[in-house]
Image (spheres, rainbow, N blue to C red):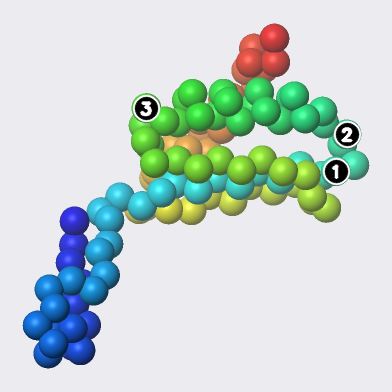
Amino acid sequence: MILLLSSKSMKNGLLSKTLQIERSVVRIEIVFNKEKQIAQPVLEALESEIYKKLLPLYPKTAVTIRKGSADGIDISGLKCDGEKRNVMGILQQVWEDDSWLN
């Protein structure tokens, strides 16, 4: 944990103003084009499978799956490109192995 102090708080003798947590939350947002007519139970099963695969590696993970005007994936909260590639690989494996649909 890193402690950040502002100059004002240091002058006032306050020890902490803001705490920054070492490992940030991994946020994954997946958007499906609403024209694809994907059923809500399918989206929920996909979300569940993503959590199942990612939580052991990234305990602070937030997944959002929604419908929108275009397909897309946004991943944030990772330290380096290697971690992002790893998460993208896991997402691809989940999508290609559709056993979670059963």
From what the image shows, is residue 60 above or below residue 74?
above
Q: Position of residue 93 (x, y in %)?
A: 56, 25
Q: Which SS class for mark 3? A: loop
The residue indicated by pointer 3 is: 56
Instruction: Tell me the amino acid under the disc marked 1.
Output: Lys
The residue indicated by pointer 1 is: 34
Decide: marks 2, 1 in contact (CB < 8 A)? yes
Q: Which SS class for mark 2? A: loop
From what the image shows, is residue 49 above or below residue 74?
above
Q: Residue at x 64, y 12 (%)?
A: 99
Q: Residue at x 37, y 36 (%)?
A: 59
Question: On the picture, is 28 further left or further right than 41?
Answer: left
Name the N-terminal-most of marks 3 and 2: 2
From what the image shows, is residue 19 above or below residue 29?
below
Question: On the picture, is 46 further left or further right than 88?
Answer: right
Which mark is drawn over residue 37? Answer: 2
Q: Quadrant of the C terminus?
A: top right
Instruction: Tell me the amino acid under the disc marked 3.
Output: Pro
